[in-house]
Image (cartoon, helix red, strand yellow):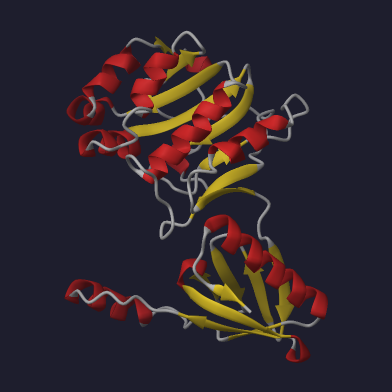
């Protein structure tokens, strides 16, 4: 669900996102700067060829302190009239492409990708929201401090078929990040009174009493046992040795379920679909777990 204060002010005709960027922070890396910023900037650059404008909103106080060049560039842009605003933020401004491409590159820190700590703070926490559009058609939308909100719009008949391929190609140099459809889960099934959902990031279990989710980055391995219609699984716990982290982990563990060591299925087709999905996310997001 969107946080209420950040929900974009879209019209009824605004499409829902079709794809989103998903990160595995254990594997994500780049040669220069912050990998999350560098990867997103690569997507934005790929989107330029299919866009005419960009709407941005930012916190001027944060930018003034941490990224003054970005604030100067922002102030050179045209303010957006109230009846044309896309976001619930004051001070929204519009970039026209390609005329203001340099200003946008400065604001988003294309050159440094967050390698400067102060600029990094402004880029991730001072930039409230931005959207890349082709006319009135949405192409890309981001709330930088919310990792779940890196959204692409690719279902419009006007969307060139090569757009999604160009975005994926732009991400080839960044291990640990990939594009997935938003219509998750990747697969789901039900067995022995438990509902299972596998997404690119978590395995979710639902019973009549509760719902639990377990991050795939904590999965060690899964082993298919077709004759039993089961997947045996092993999960790792944090090995942090610092006292504060151990105390937090101990407190949290009192209120969370243990990861499942057996995933049950009712049909072989459901088991095979889960195994295929695990292979897919492991390959795309460079997870360390094994599938046997």
Identified at 25% across, 77% down, the residue is 246
Q: Nearer the viewer, residue 126 or 215?
A: 215
**Depicted 201 relative to depicted 232: above or below:** above
For residue 253, side relative to residue 217 (left or right): left
Q: Position of residue 25 (x, y in %)?
A: 41, 56
Residue 231, image quadrant: bottom right
Residue 290 placed where, x, y %? 56, 74
Estimate the x, y position of residue 46 in percent, counting from the top left.
55, 29
- Horizontally, residue 168 falls left or right of residue 32, namely right
If the image is split into quadrants, where does the C terminus sit? bottom right
In percent of the image, x 46 and y 40: which residue is there?
A: 39
Left or right: where 226 falls relative to 123: right
**Residue 237's quadrant in the figure?**
bottom left
Q: Nearer the viewer, residue 54 or 116?
A: 116
Q: Residue at x 38, y 16 (%)?
A: 103
Residue 18 position within the rendered picture, expressed as x and y whole percent measured from the top left:
67, 41
Q: Is residue 242 left or right of residue 259?
A: left
């Amino acid at each position: 669900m969107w946080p209420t204060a950040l929900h974009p002010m879209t019209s009824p005709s605004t499409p829902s996102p079709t794809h989103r960027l998903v990160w595995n922070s254990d594997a994500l890396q780049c040669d220069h700067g912050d990998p999350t910023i560098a990867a997103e900037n690569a997507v934005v650059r790929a989107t330029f060829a299919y866009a005419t404008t960009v709407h941005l909103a930012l916190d001027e106080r944060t930018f003034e302190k941490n990224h003054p060049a970005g604030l100067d560039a922002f102030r050179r842009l045209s303010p957006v009239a109230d009846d044309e605003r896309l976001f619930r933020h004051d001070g929204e401004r519009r970039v026209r492409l390609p005329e203001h491409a340099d200003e946008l590159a400065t604001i988003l820190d294309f050159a440094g990708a967050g390698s400067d700590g102060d600029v990094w703070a402004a880029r991730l926490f001072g930039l409230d929201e931005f959207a890349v559009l082709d006319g009135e058609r949405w192409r890309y939308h981001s709330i930088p401090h919310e990792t779940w909100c890196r959204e692409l719009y690719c279902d419009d008949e006007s969307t060139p078929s090569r757009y999604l391929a160009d975005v994926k190609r732009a991400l080839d140099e960044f291990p640990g990040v990939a594009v997935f459809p938003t219509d998750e889960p990747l697969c789901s099934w039900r067995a022995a009174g438990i509902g299972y959902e596998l997404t690119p990031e978590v395995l979710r279990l639902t019973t009549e009493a509760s719902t639990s989710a377990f991050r795939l980055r904590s999965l060690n391995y899964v082993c298919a046992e077709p004759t039993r219609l089961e997947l045996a699984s092993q999960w790792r716990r944090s090995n942090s040795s610092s006292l504060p982290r151990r105390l937090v982990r101990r407190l949290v563990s009192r209120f969370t379920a243990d990861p499942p060591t057996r995933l049950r299925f009712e049909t072989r087709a459901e088991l095979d679909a889960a195994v295929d999905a695990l292979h897919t996310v492991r390959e795309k997001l460079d997870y360390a777990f094994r599938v046997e």
